[in-house]
Amino acid sequence: MEFRHEWKHELNAMDLLVLRQRLRAVLRPDPHARNGRYEIRSLYFDTPTDRALREKLDGVSCREKFRIRYYDGDTSLLHLEKKSKRGGLGNKQSCVLTREEAQMLVEGQVDWMPDHPQDLVRELHTRMRIQGLRPRTIVDYTREPFVFAPGNVRVTLDYNLRTGLSCVDFLNPACVTVPAGNAPILLEVKWDGFLPDVVRDAVQLPGRRVTSFSKYAQCRVYG
């Protein structure tokens, strides 16, 4: 399992304007983004005792969480993802789910999972059976992504964070989400072996420090 370096910085609206211009001058927009951005909807899983949430709030260094995700309202392409953290390093494993499989997960139907060809699906099934992992909340936000080939760098600006409260009807576009409290704008920087100086300089802002902000934890602000 290969881990990547990760930085997060909380921003305000003025920071966003400044960084957007800097990043456009130095990096190139992610070619998968439409008009430079895309809308992300994720459904996060947690245990009945909120293990993933508690580990995040308690600052546990080694932790994992599962989610399902799609982009720009397109439910024809869905990904099951497992995010692993080891201090300041992160890893993401991913596999494709069909819409039918995702809907069965939302509904708690798991009989199809043990014989699935994807290891990640089988691992999620084991966690659901042993730990009681289940869909917990929807997380929506807007992302502006940039890439830089040297160092395999990815820089993103995330904002308009919204929570589905107790709703887990992940594939229903009519599922209501609300602003997730007073959530900040978030800068994320991810890279492999090295971070080029040109990128390091571009993302620096006075008074901004690395943070451990979690979108999932913020979206649990209402329970």
Image: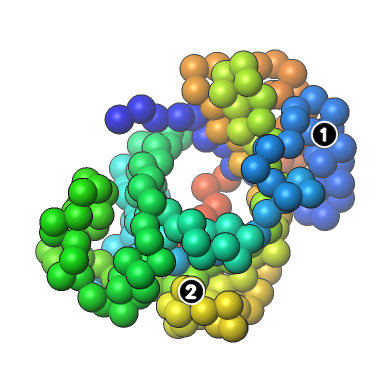
Figure check: 191 above or below 35: above
Q: Secondary structure at mark 1?
A: helix
What residue is rendered at 68% in x and 54% in y?
A: 38
Query: Does any portion of residue 168 appear in the rendered image?
Result: yes
Position of residue 155 measured from the top left corner of the image (x, y, whole percent): 65, 36
Left or right: 151 with respect to 65? Answer: right
Left or right: 158 with respect to 41? Answer: right
The label shown at residue 24 is: 1
What residue is rendered at 76% in x and 46% in y?
A: 36
Q: Quadrant of residue 211?
A: top right
Question: Of circles 1 and 2, which is in front?
Answer: 2
Query: Does any portion of residue 184 appear in the rendered image?
Result: no
Q: Which residue is mark 2?
A: 171
Q: Looking at the figure, which quarter contains the N terminus?
A: top left
Say which amino acid is labelled 2: Leu
- Callout 2: few (<14), some (14-19), or many (20+) C-alpha neighbours within 10 Å? many
Q: Earlier in the sequence, mark 1 or mark 2?
A: 1
Say which amino acid is labelled 1: Arg
Position of residue 43 measured from the top left corner of the image (x, y, whole percent): 44, 66
Q: Secondary structure at mark 2?
A: loop
- 180 or 105: nearer the viewer: 105
Position of residue 73 measured from the top left corner of the image (x, y, whole percent): 60, 66
Figure check: 170 above or below 120: below
The total number of labels drawn is 2
Left or right: 195 with respect to 135? Answer: right
What residue is rendered at 57% in x and 63% in y?
A: 74
